[in-house]
Image: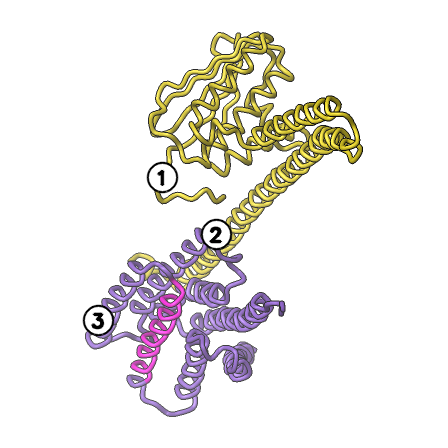
């Protein structure tokens, strides 16, 4: 009311300052919103870019791994099965009919031996592609089988125990978990120089947890993330991409006692409506 | 000298209005689907007609006052319609309708019951506050909508900041118009005209932003012919 009753000069000041203030506030607010939105969008774009980079690294790793696997298969077939079959053919050549009966029997016996070896070799290759225990009896049996074989070598003490695995995961998820465990165990055997590996399975908050302990040299989560972003560590990238498909997580850490390394794999339980698409 | 400047700004006022009408006609084929452009063209046309009528046609003082108070009404409806169309939140849209209904009732009662000297300051003040609040909400909504493009790539942004700058810049002039001397009011009317011209420039930008956005979208929708 005072303002409204003020003199013409007073009104002029109020008018000028008020108008200026309103304009400054409005323009300031508009500029703030523009810059804030730009900042947020740029940040999101950067995140998306990083995500794409990560996807690219994982895809490259998966392609490289696939190529390596093909090369290994090709080498196994070419270097082992090929010569065996060629040798069997030598025993069963055209001159066999012209030879005496004892030599013929000897040759056939040799050829049969070689064919048996070839069958075993092909069976081994096939098992390495898809373990029959996993397919027929599930993750628990396949992992136990794997650990028994490792322990049987006498080089390292390996044991596994599944505590709560009455309800099996979907076969696709079981295969993913099996491959991840296989890769981790392989890494431990190759790099850690540990004296034991122990695997336990539990359920927690609707998720299946697998914990691997070993007493050798290991890595922690920061190392894992660093290796995942770098061009080395193909196996670890493969673990990441497999777990991403199963919506799972992995945690590399040192035990509270700082004596053991611990790797925890967390796989959510199956959702009946869930698909394994990324 | 002051009279010449006043006349210059009055000419500027009509010129910018004409520019918008010309732009609307030129872009008609492209903007006919967007009601906002029709609304701003209509706004400029009504503003020009009312200004010319009150200046050159010998209307009585009371009739002129009623015409201008009706213009407040029309201006509010046009600005609100554009903001209402641009906002996505349904509950806020509903609130805008309720607030508009309350404003219409209030303005009608005020205009009938009150004798004002020059202009309807109070309805203009309420209109300004309401439009500013709606505009701030629009900007807030856009700020949080990071899925969309940059805020300034939307044509609505340019129209709405036009409203905001015009209303913020003319708020005190309109509020104090009935308490000012004629000379002082004339001086500040020049400033209001200048701010009005800025608003119209921002409206003009919105036509080009819309046109540019449309061109980009056309390219985005192109699919290569894969046999």
Instruction: For mark 3, name the chain.
Output: B
Determine the CA span between mark 1 and mark 3: 57 Å
- The colour of chain B is purple
Query: Dot 3, how many residues are within 10 Å of its Cα: few (below 14), some (14-19), or many (20+)?
Result: few
Q: Which residues are magenta?
A: B64-87
User: Residue A201 at x, y = what percent?
Assistant: 41, 20
Determine the CA span between mark 3 and mark 2: 38 Å
Which of marks 2 and 3 precedes in the sequence? 3
User: Residue B84 at x, y = what percent?
Assistant: 36, 66
Circles 3 and 2 in contact, beta carbons < 8 Å: no
Quadrant of the rendered image containing residue B92: bottom left
Q: Nearer the viewer, mark 2 or mark 1?
A: 1
Circles 2 and 1 in contact, beta carbons < 8 Å: no
Tag on residue B105? Answer: 3
Q: Nearer the viewer, mark 3 or mark 2?
A: 2
Of residues A78 and B183, the one drawn nearer to the viewer in this rendering: A78
Chain letter for yellow, please: A
Tag on residue A271? Answer: 1
């Amino acid at each position: 009311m005072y303002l409204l009753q003020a003199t013409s000069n007073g009104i002029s000041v109020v008018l000028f300052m008020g108008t200026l203030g309103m304009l400054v506030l409005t323009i300031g607010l508009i500029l703030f919103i523009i810059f804030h939105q730009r900042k947020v969008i740029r940040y999101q774009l950067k995140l998306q870019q990083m995500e794409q980079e990560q996807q690219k690294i994982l895809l490259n790793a998966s392609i490289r791994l696939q190529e390596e696997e093909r090369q290994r298969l090709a080498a196994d077939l070419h270097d082992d099965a090929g010569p065996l079959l060629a040798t069997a053919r030598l025993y069963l050549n055209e001159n066999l009919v012209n030879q005496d009966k004892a030599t013929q029997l000897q040759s056939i016996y040799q050829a049969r031996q070689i064919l048996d070896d070839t069958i075993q070799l092909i069976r081994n290759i096939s098992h390495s592609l898809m373990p029959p225990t996993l397919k027929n009896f599930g993750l628990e049996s396949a992992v136990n089988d794997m650990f028994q074989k490792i322990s049987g070598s006498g080089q390292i003490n390996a044991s596994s125990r599944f505590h709560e695995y009455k309800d099996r995961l979907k076969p696709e998820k079981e295969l993913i978990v099996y491959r991840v465990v296989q890769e981790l165990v392989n890494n431990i055997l190759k790099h850690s120089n540990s004296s034991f590996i122990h695997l336990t399975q539990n359920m927690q908050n609707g998720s299946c947890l697998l914990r691997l302990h070993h007493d050798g040299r290991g890595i922690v989560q920061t190392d894992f993330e660093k290796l995942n972003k770098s061009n080395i560590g193909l196996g670890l990238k493969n673990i990441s991409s497999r777990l991403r498909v199963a919506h799972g997580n992995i945690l590399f850490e040192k035990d509270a006692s700082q004596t053991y390394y611990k790797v925890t794999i967390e796989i959510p339980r199956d959702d009946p409506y869930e698909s394994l698409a990324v | 000298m002051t009279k010449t400047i006043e006349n210059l700004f009055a000419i500027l006022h009509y010129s910018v209005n004409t520019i918008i009408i010309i732009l609307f006609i030129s872009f008609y084929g492209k903007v006919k689907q967007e009601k906002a452009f029709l609304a701003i063209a209509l706004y400029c046309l009504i503003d020009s007609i009312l200004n010319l009528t009150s200046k050159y046609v010998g209307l009585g003082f009371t009739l002129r006052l009623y015409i201008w108070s009706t213009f407040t009404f029309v201006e509010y409806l046009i600005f609100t319609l554009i903001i209402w169309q641009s906002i996505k939140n349904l509950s806020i849209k509903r609130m805008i309708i309720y607030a508009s209904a309350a404003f219409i009732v209030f303005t009608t009662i005020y205009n009938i019951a009150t004798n004002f000297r020059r202009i309807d300051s109070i309805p203009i003040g309420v209109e300004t506050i309401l439009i500013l609040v709606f505009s701030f909400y629009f900007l807030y909504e856009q700020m949080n909508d990071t899925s969309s493009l940059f805020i300034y790539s939307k044509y609505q942004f340019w129209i709405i900041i036009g409203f905001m700058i015009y209303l913020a810049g003319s708020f005190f002039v309109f509020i104090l118009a009935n308490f000012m001397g004629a000379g002082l009011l004339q001086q500040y009317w020049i400033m209001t005209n200048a701010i009005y011209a800025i608003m119209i420039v921002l409206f003009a930008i919105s036509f080009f932003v819309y046109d540019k956005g449309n061109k980009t979208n056309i390219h985005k929708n192109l699919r290569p012919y894969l046999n």
